[in-house]
Image (cartoon, rainbow, N blue to C red):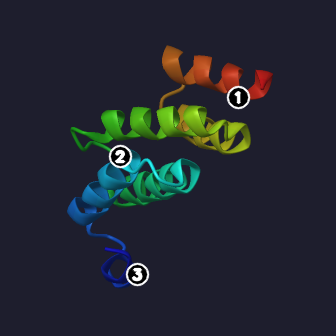
Amino acid sequence: YVNYLGRNRADIDVLRKYAEASERIAENRRKSLTDAATAYHQILRNLPPDAPDRNETVNTLIGLYIELEAWGDLQFFVQQQLALQPDDAYLTYCRGLALYN
């Protein structure tokens, strides 16, 4: 996967499979979750704004940032999403969570 993704960063299907597989790896959990978060972030860069699974992908990435306790990454990401969806209560909550931690 990694070699292929290095050459094909916009292949959303392979990125999603890589991200889902990384989430399930128990060995070196932190690195696996970080790899998954990176893949989901890349997916979001390539997904159109109106893609039906965009919100699910956003929520998955938020969940990974929370599990990793990556508060700075969470704050930055949520701030970007709030620019697109300023009235989203969940994003606002996540921004507060990131700022609190």
Instruction: Give the camera-side residue of 29 and 80.
Output: 29
Instruction: Give the camera-side residue of 80 and 74.
Output: 74
Q: Secondary structure at mark 2?
A: helix
Q: Identify the mark at residue 35; answer none if there is no mark.
A: none
Tell me if residue 56 can be seen.
yes
In the image, what residue occupies the spot 50% across and 18% down?
A: 90
Which quadrant of the rendered structure holds the N terminus? bottom left
Lower sequence index among marks 3 and 1: 3
Q: Secondary structure at mark 1?
A: helix
Lower sequence index among marks 2 and 3: 3
Q: Where 79 sits versus 92, above or below?
A: below
In the image, what residue occupies the spot 31% across and 49% down?
A: 20
Q: Identify the mark at residue 24; answer none if there is no mark.
A: 2
Left or right placement of residue 98 versus residue 8 in this view: right
Left or right placement of residue 97 versus residue 12 in this view: right
Q: Which residue is mark 3?
A: 6
Of circles 2 and 3, the one toward us is 2
Q: Secondary structure at mark 3?
A: helix
Asked where in the image residue 76 lies, by quadrant, the reply is top right
Q: Which residue is mark 1?
A: 98
Which quadrant of the rendered structure holds the C terminus? top right
In the image, what residue occupies the spot 65% across and 26% down?
A: 95
Q: Disc 2 marks which amino acid?
A: Arg
Sort mark 3 into few (<14), some (14-19) or many (20+) by Cα contacts within 10 Å: few
Distance CA(mark 2)–CA(mark 3): 21 Å
Left or right placement of residue 26 versus residue 14 in this view: right
Q: Position of residue 44 (x, y in %)?
A: 40, 52
